[in-house]
Image (cartoon, grey):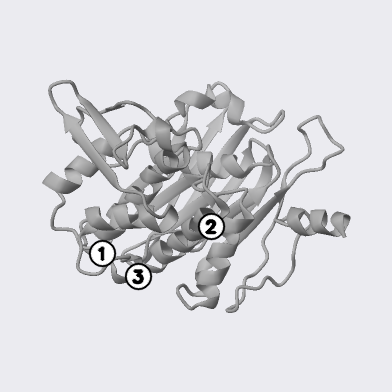
Amino acid sequence: MISKLSLNNFKAFEDEVFDLGRLNILSGLNSSGKSSVIQAIRLLQEKKPLPELGPLVQYIRSDMKGFRLECEQIVANENDVVAFSYERGGKLEGKSAFSGIVSYISADRLGPRTSLPLSIDKDIATVGIRGEYIVDFLTRLDNDWDDLTIPGPLIVKEGNGVNANIREWLRFISPGINFEYKSDNNTDLGQTVFNKHRPVHVGFGLSYTLPVIASILIHASQLAAKKTESVLLLLENPEAHLHPSGQTKIGEMLALAAACGVQIVVETHSDHLMNGIRIAIKDKKIDHADVKAFFFKKDSTDDSNEEPVTVESPDIDEHGMLDFWPEGFFDETEKNLMRLI
């Protein structure tokens, strides 16, 4: 588990330290630095530039000489430090030793598709950055991981396996949904079917949330079965395209997964997801000390991109209440209601 993340002259961050918990919520206005935190963790894990972000020189804040990333992680009850630094014109230097499963699911997921690719690389053990390997992932659950058992807090339907509970969680989020999938190894393609319809006929929400649900349940089961020593999920907007009730349930699911030992860093704009987590805390489904909230702020009067981001981190108590409510932190509903009164 990552216990601390330090960013120095990385993108919008001058010198910021994040004390992380099991479940970490990143929120704030657009272009305030939330995604940069996830990108920093990915950079530490992958040990090379991230293809979609361009050369490393573009990661450096303003006119600084370089950047440094560092995280402390707990491995086998001992602290370990992972760090990288880069200076203009040089090479990425440092140590990387992330253990266990690290899975990143982008906000730019594929959505409804007539077909999805099957991975020919059997070493790939996640759904893919865009959820593109979801059918391949589920097929492996049938063939290679059929002995997995979901940890108790995440079980929706007793006496059923991981695959059945993936279907049940989909129904929990969208009642009445019957999900099926199939794969064809001759064409390296897979298909998903909802209520016997192509995904495009049931909207975007189910296709967007399926990789998230499957990742949480399968990786939590792998952790419980000790098939991996740790799981870190990096999720961007897992609530995208879901009805508010579904967003709340995704928040509860994240809390349950974190209570089972999965570490999660989630970027979200949803007060419903946040409230789902707060309700889970109040209902004693997760310890409030395991949940960290980070609100990112940037000077709205400065368009030069030179002003560093500031981060506020309110504490959440055992009743799901915050010790202070930052301006702009999921407060738009209340502001709008006051204008309507």
Task: Name the secondary structure under disc 3.
Answer: helix
Amino acid residing under circle 3 = Pro
Q: Nearer the viewer, residue 224 or 339?
A: 339
Q: Which circle marks residue 274 in the picture? A: none
Mark before the other along the chain sequence, 1 or 3 = 3
Residues at marks 2 and 1 touching, judged by CB atoms closer than 8 Å: no
The residue carrying mark 2 is 245
Decide if residue 270 is in sight here.
yes
Residue at 76% x, 32% y is 305
Comparing labels 3 and 2, the label whose residue is closer to the camera: 2
The location of residue 339, given as percent across then percent down, is 87, 54
Comparing labels 2 and 1, the label whose residue is closer to the camera: 2
To which quarter of the image does residue 293 belong?
A: bottom right
Residue at 33% x, 26% y is 114
The residue carrying mark 3 is 153
To which quarter of the image does residue 181 belong?
A: top left
Task: Name the secondary structure under disc 1.
Answer: helix
Residue 22, placed above or below residue 94: below
Task: Name the secondary structure under disc 2.
Answer: helix
The location of residue 298, given as percent across then percent down, is 76, 44
Residue at 76% x, 53% y is 332
Q: Which circle marks residue 224 in the picture? A: 1
